Image (cartoon, rainbow, N blue to C red):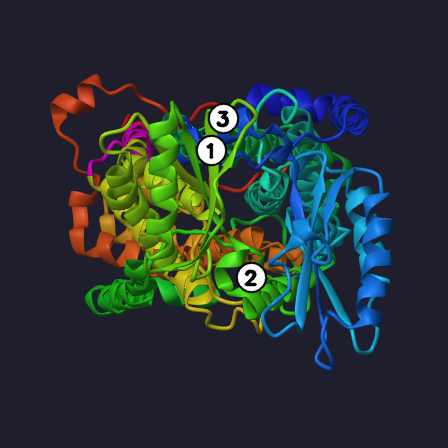
Amino acid sequence: MAALARWCVTHRLAAVLLWLATLVGVGAAAAVAGTAYSNDYDVPGTESGRAAALLEEGFPHLGGDTDTIVWHTDDGTVDAADVQQTMTKTLDKVAELPGISSVVSPYHAAGAGQISKDAHTAYAVVTFDQAAADVEKADAEALVRTAEAAASDGLQVELGGSAIGLTEAKGGHTAEIVGVLVAAVVLFLAFGSLAASLLPIATALVSVGTAYAGIALLGHVMTVADFAPMLGLLVGLGVGIDYALFIVTRHRRGLKRGLSVDEAARTAVATTGRAVVFAGATVCIALLGMLILRLDFLNGVAIAASLTVVLTVAASVTLLPALLSYIGMRALSRRERAHLTEHGPAPELPTGFAARWSAFVERRPKLLGAIALVLMAALALPTLSLRLGTSDQGNNPQSSTTRQAYDLLAEGFGPGVNGPLTLVADVHGAEDKLALDRLAGTLDDTKGVAAVSPVTYDESGEIALLTVTPSSPPQSAATSELVDELRTEILPKAEQGTSLEAYVGGITASYDDFAEVIVAKLPLFVGVVIGLGCVLLLLAFRSIGIPLKAAAMNVAAVASAFGVVVAIFQWGWGSELLGLGRAGPIEPFLPVIMVSVLFGLSMDYQVFLVSRMYEEWLETGDNRRAVRVGLAETSRVINSAAVIMISVFLAFVLSGDRVIAMFGIALAAAVALDAFVLRTLLVPALMHMLGGANWWLPKWLDRILPRISIEPPECRGVVVPGQRVAAAGAAQPELSGER
């Protein structure tokens, strides 16, 4: 690390130009190639996956995205001559738009049943010639403009469907801008120097911008979800600014001790830079743990987020020292520079609230530890009611056209019309067809079924399709129960004595299958991630207790963050107020991604906090002093870093995307609890109570473990004028127990 830092400082122009060239080059390639994101939730081997494959084989024309135009009138009916004339002309125009494959009007025989019983609501089915992921946004926007032009004072026109949802994505980068601005304010308050406060942001923007473009290219070679770039931005900005903050803080400390600018930059990278690399590695390990689930959808998310973290770490230890050497002594505020000139160099000692808080925790570890445990347990309680399921356009904000269309359809035709189930059957003869006819009659009499379509066969007559409309919304538990009943009771009875093979598909069935696969693999995934994290901490701190406490703290942070997410998004506490739509189930893929990201981020603070305690323990052998000094010296920078992360994460609530808002709130809650409750309260309280047992390691294990160093101790003395001080770690023992 010291050699890398020396090269970046010596060749600072080259380091800056290399990063800028990479940013421009990757960005240009992404602009030329375009994006190819895909939200493919299909899991090979599941029943919904087999239903989708059979449906594609027999009815390929149904592969295009299906959207709806819904119109409603309170005065009169949709059968009135003026309404019919207006909407018929509109639908004719829609049929001529580019990308539209077909339009089924309720005023034609093919659209029978598309007018509500009270005749106040009607809808047309519009099918694109491509799947939603491939529909051009301009084509979807043209459909919206054409349909909404028919609206008048007495006629409400709304649109729903996946392609329509593309038009509601908020443009611009409001969330990122707000997050960066708040981070800049916090950094300026922490440093008192404009130049120093801008460097972490500049470093993060360059690395995250490169990663954002790289993720766009990644989408051309593997399945990458459309929210992966935003997730990468969210994580990258948070950890990127934080990592740079830690290094700049160490650099400023070196300047105050009398080191030259170049020497202070090299020292910062050689010490804190190593901790940054280690922390980034733990985040990547947690993210890449998703690969063991063997789900294409999650593989792309894991690699995209890991790419972002790798680039932020690389920029922090290469680009940042080069920029630090450019700004020179301006890394300190004017008052700090004046004080240094007048009084000379001096070590920076922990004072103020940080020192008082550390002493307070030392005096009352049992009481404070109990308070922290109660708080974390209370916040984690909602996690027990976590329900994974379908989040659809019914969860969108009330002002959106998709939410309006969803509600109008539910009111006019029943809630199940927004998410019908598809029964696809492989038919092998007349006996199977008779069984299907009997099945349709059975379904008509089944509780929870609102309507059943006639059986439709493909051209060969070997694949049949029935559409089952539930009497409950697609995201409700009742619809999931209906799917289970169809699969375990109704279909097996219908197939008995025949060669008929029928499968249940549709939105709810697909999400339920996806959730079932993830839940089944979740224990293995969590075990691997926690296990690898513990091994890394064991190697770094040569202690059994430190990794075990870290694992417990990380699980507590994840559980409490899930509790906050459940309360807001599933229970609906303030979701409408925040513009996040109404309450609904949690996305099936969210737990895995959140566990990966939250576990990785939680490890960061553990590394930065305990590494300083471990250094003091090696020097003094006094556990109480080690914990007190470590907390006092790191709590201020950890809290500043946490405020920045929380601000960046909460800003993503402004993105207008429910999934990204879930990530933002979950990450913000986890970081807040981790920094302000766990790392600065519960962890030091437990370490005070455990005493020397914190650092216990069996001798036989100590002999066989490799010795690594996270953050070598730097010389704490001050520079005597005219005396050269070696780079930190050059002549210092590593944090390996060798003293």
| 17 up-or-down from 86: above or below | above
Question: Is residue 691 one of those drawn in magenta?
Answer: no
Q: For label 3, count other residues whose C-alpha is less than 10 Å away and answer few (under 14), some (14-19) or many (20+).
A: some
| 85 up-or-down from 706: above or below | below
Q: Give coordinates of residue 208: x percent, y percent.
A: 66, 37
Residue 461's tag is 3
Q: Residue at x 22, y 70 (%)?
A: 367
Residue type, numbered disc 2: Gly
Asked if residue 333 lies left or right of residue 580, the reply is right
Cα separation between marks 1 and 3? 7 Å
Is 219 or 255 nearer to us in this picture? Answer: 219
For label 1, the SS is strand
Q: Which residues are magenta?
A: 529-544
Q: Residue at x 62, y 44 (%)?
A: 230
Asked if residue 42 lies left or right of residue 139, the reply is left
Q: Quadrant of the N terminus?
A: top right
Q: What residue does disc 2 label?
A: 394
Cα separation between marks 2 and 1? 30 Å
Q: Residue at x 68, y 59 (%)?
A: 123
Q: Is residue 683 visible?
A: yes
Cα separation between marks 2 and 3? 36 Å
Residue type, numbered disc 1: Ala
Asked if residue 524 lies left or right of residue 450, the reply is left
Residue type, numbered disc 3: Gly
Q: What residue does disc 1 label?
A: 464
